[in-house]
Image: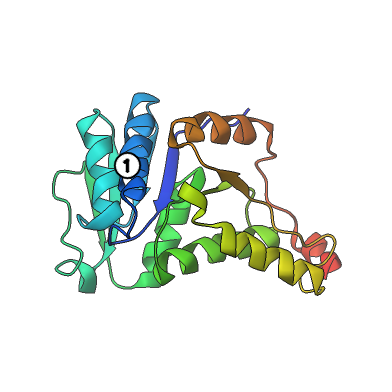
Amino acid sequence: MAQLTSVCVYCGSGFGGDPAFADAARRLGTALARAGVKLVYGGGNVGLMGTVAGATLDAGGTVTGIIPDFLKSRERMLDAVQETIVVSDMHTRKRLMFDRADAFVALPGGIGTLEELVEQLTWAQLGQHRKPILLLSVNGFWDPLITLIDHMRTHGFIREGLDLNYLVGEDPDRVVETLSEVLARSEPAPLADELIEKRF
């Protein structure tokens, strides 16, 4: 049975216009720390990124930040984290965040958050991983994306056998419990390449 030991959190480098976003980031970071689950994130000390990392640290948790060299000054690296990994580019950052995490959570964020989330959804759709992906839809933030996915499905671009597998939650305090339950039921090995070809 797979255990939840680390969660990669994608989120904005800004706070957004709703105070509930920062509150959710704080609650999620606190919940991760209390459950003994490591936070893996983008390494910055700004916006929701800094909020979730700071809350994890404040509650006694462990944090790994992964940041490209060119963003060190813009996103102001959080020096207090236990592990900071500086990489050369965004591709390396995303791959390391994937490798270090057992599951993924998307808090509200901008185009960068969306891009990271959609990449994980795509990799899962192609059978490259079975790690749980949860959209933390604070005050319905991710509802338009869910509607768009339904629209794609209706028009035949998300076909049977290639559906997207993701979770939607609204309560940051339940994220660890939800991911742990799903991970415990999942099969650890990715699909074989031959099976991926058959799905197309």
Horizontally, residue 178 falls left or right of residue 154, namely left
Write the residue at 42% across / 48% down. Answer: 8
Q: In this view, does 49 lie above or below 73?
A: above
Q: Is residue 139 above or below residue 62?
A: below
Give the percent coordinates (x, y) of residue 168.
59, 46
Q: Could you say whether the residue bearing mark 1 is in a helix, strand or loop? A: helix
Give the percent coordinates (x, y) of residue 128.
64, 58
Q: How crowded is mark 1: few (under 14 residues within 10 Å), some or many (20 or more)?
A: some
Q: Is residue 34 above or below residue 121?
A: above
Occupied quadrant, residue 149: bottom right
The answer, for residue 176, to whether it is visible in the render is yes
Name the residue tied to disc 1: 23
Write the residue at 36% across / 46% down. Answer: 20
The answer, for residue 137, to whether it is visible in the render is no
**Front position in the image: 190 or 24:** 24
Query: Image quadrant for the N terminus?
Result: top right
